[in-house]
Image: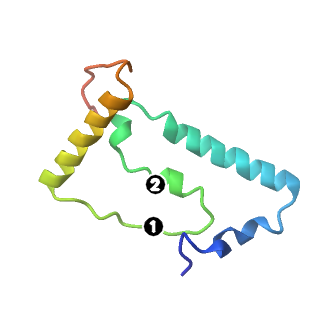
Amino acid sequence: MATSGDNRLDDDFDGMAREALIAEVRKLRHGIRAHRDSTGHALCWHHPDLWTLLPERTDPAPVVPSWPEFLRGCIRYRQSLDRQLPDAPRNNEPYTG
């Protein structure tokens, strides 16, 4: 199996016509923007839709931390948002997932 450091993962580009390459770039940009534009509770979710943009078909099962470690990570992530985006709008909307 090829790894993410393996240059052969992107060999599919070699035979693509210009139009196909442009379409691929647009598809990738759309996926990146959808991920970037996640907000609110969506910031905390597993995003397999982003991975489906890659040509290799894998379904990696994430290693899930125990609850205490997971919650510590969530708190640190939220604290980092306070540091990095102190003026970002805030809301109190409950999670309704």
Q: Where is residue 20? Give x, y as percent.
A: 81, 55
Residue 9 falls left or right of residue 23 = left
The residue labelled by disc 2 is 48
In this view of the protein, can residue 39 be seen by the observer? yes
Contact check, label 1 and label 2, Cβ < 8 Å: yes
Residue 34 drawn above or below residue 16: above
Tell me the SS state at disc 1: loop
Question: Residue 22 location, x and y as percent?
Answer: 79, 49
Q: In which quarter of the image is the C terminus?
A: top left
Secondary element at image label 2: helix
Image position of 10 with respect to 48: above or below? below
Q: Using residue 36 as the reference point, say whether residue 64 is left or right of it.
A: left
Q: Residue at x 52, y 57 (%)?
A: 51
Question: Is residue 97 something that shows in the picture?
Answer: no
What is the number of the mark on residue 59?
1
Quick one: 97 or 17, which is closer to the camera? 17
Front residue of 84 and 88: 84
Residue 31, how many percent across, how many down? Answer: 58, 45
CA distance separating discs 1 and 2: 8 Å
Choose the circle earlier in sequence order: 1 or 2. Answer: 2
**Amino acid, disc 2:** Pro
Residue with the most extreme left position? 68
Which residue is found at the position 87% from the left and 54% from the top? Answer: 18
Residue lying at 43% horizontally and 50% vertically, measured from the top left: 47
